[in-house]
Image (tube, coloured by chain):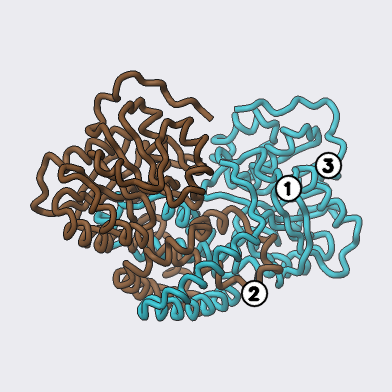
Chain colours: A brown, B cyan
Amino acid sequence: MPRPLAANSSMPDVPFQRIVIVGLGLMGGSIAKALRSRGFAGSLVGVVVDAQAVRRLRSAAKYWRISLTCEPEPALRNADLVLLATPPQIALRQLPELVRHISATGMVSDVASIKTPVAQLGRQLLGDRFIPGHPVVGGEKTGFAAARKNLYQGARVILTPLPEQAPAALDAVCGFWQCLGATVSQMTPEAHDQALAATSHLPHLLAFAYMAGLADQVPALRDLAGGGLRDFSRIAASDPDLWTAILSENRSAVVQHLKALQENLDTVRQMLAGDDTRTLKAFLKQGRACRQQFQFPPLTY
Amino acid sequence: MPRPLAANSSMPDVPFQRIVIVGLGLMGGSIAKALRSRGFAGSLVGVVVDAQAVRRLRSAAKYWRISLTCEPEPALRNADLVLLATPPQIALRQLPELVRHISATGMVSDVASIKTPVAQLGRQLLGDRFIPGHPVVGGEKTGFAAARKNLYQGARVILTPLPEQAPAALDAVCGFWQCLGATVSQMTPEAHDQALAATSHLPHLLAFAYMAGLADQVPALRDLAGGGLRDFSRIAASDPDLWTAILSENRSAVVQHLKALQENLDTVRQMLAGDDTRTLKAFLKQGRACRQQFQFPPLTY
């Protein structure tokens, strides 16, 4: 494990000094590791679920100079940035309770893959002190051990602030992510959820559904898959609790994209059944050409 | 580029001394590189499409000690193994012509992803001197430059011989692949194509179809995809000509699996539309559990 940089002075760019991260899984843990490995010298508190989690993570947290707690009230009162990094359904439950303890100047952000419900609740509870965010990175592995100090390096982070958002607060959260190496952009929560249904949520659902559909053929098929199915289905190894929540919260957009896909598949089936290779080839070419236009994050594993 | 091992004596295990590889793309090129890098000292002829291809590949072929030709007759007459490594639709066209020049003791094998039509034709033309094979590896990159000497290391190769296959010939082709580091198994061509429809052909079709379905939303979505869609759709970067041929040749099995998937997606859409999170979660868990039972090849990139 690489030693985080020892830092006597704060990293100049991080626009917060007392940061509380609620949830030290892949996303929150990677924020903490990224901050420390880039020399952040401010206070860093990690909020975990219970005393058992405090014990379990104690030595790793000490290594990364994270103060661990399952009783976050004092830290919340002092924080200038609280980052919610729990799964979206848990974040939605936690937010009202957390808000009771956050100071009137503390900013709050989050990392949920679905933005409309979180943005609505945050706006209601915190006004423009809540700046919803979504780093478009992740992985099927979970937990602090899977967290990586370079997870956000080169990543895209989408912020979905209020239209009337005070620019100083927005700039600060934006600067925070830029310090971790991310590229930040903005859109409305609704546009975010509509887009991510197509670029992330439905692909996850399809990967899960594809593998579930093979359930009764596993003994015959398990040794006959190559790298194609391995990569196609990698996201089916993701956390079913998390993905149930994301898919449920964004079900209207996901259903809409799924319907379009189903019509698409009807057309494809007709091409195949009629052995219309000319149309099929044009269709495959369109798929490949479309993929070439996407800007995917670089492979990091 | 790593230097292939210099070898004064033949690699002891390769059961052939004069090998002709028809097609020096990813598959055929990787066989040639694997043979030379493992010390194969026998004769190795690479058959390419025309004089221009001979010129283009000349220096790379010299490096790997491959004799290049676009006029394969003399080499075919002397070969004790001819490996067809062209795309299946081309291999089907080439085989009758090639067979006219192959000696009565020469063995023939191939690497096509679809086995029934190739096996039928090979059987008809060569009897049990044709042993159809399919290495369950590949990649979306094509051409000799993309070929890798370790492509078959740890890979699975499926042979689909006749039931009445002479064991010596089968053992020789099996031994050939084992020399390249592969694990060899056997099944009928029909069982192979049925299984591969599920583990490879339909996933490719879905990846292409998914990306084709996003064609009119590219400007809005191209910067909003993470590693999930990147890996899910990697195989949509594959060669449309090759995949049109595979899907067309195996359309009956692919359509059958596609129908089952479409029913599956209808069910999923109902779960989502009704926000039946309990059933949805069980379904996602089933997909994840099913994937965990698969033996995928290791990541090599």
- Which residue is identified by label 3? B14
The residue lying toward the viewer, choosing from A146 and A58, is: A58
| Circles 1, 3 touching at the beta carbon (< 8 Å) | no
Q: Is residue A267 visible?
A: no
Tell me which chain the residue with mark 3 is part of. Answer: B
Residue B73's tag is 1
In space, the residues marked 1 and 3 are separated at their CA atoms by 23 Å
Q: Amino acid at mark 2?
A: Asp
Image quadrant for the N terminus of chain B? top right
**Few, some or many residues within 10 Å of mark 3 (<14, 14–19, 20+):** many
Disc on res. B190: none
Say which of B94 and B223 sits in front: B223
In the rendered structure, the residue with mark 2 lies on which chain? A
Spot occupied by residue B231 in the image (x, y as percentages of width and height)? 47, 52
Tell whether A222 sits left or right of A297.
right
Cα distance in 3D space between marks 3 and 2? 39 Å
The answer to whether A176 is drawn above or below residue A5 in the figure is below
Q: Amino acid at mark 1?
A: Glu
Rendered-image quadrant of the C terminus of chain B: top right
> Residue sitting at 71 percent across and 55 percent down?
B110
Nearer the observer, disc 3 or disc 2?
Answer: 2
Label 1 chain ID? B
The answer to whether dots 3 and 2 both sit on one chain is no
Q: Give the residue at mark 2.
A: A216
Of B31 and A101, nearer the camera is A101
Q: Nearer the viewer, residue B240 or B2?
A: B2
> Which label sits in the foreground, 2 or 1?
2
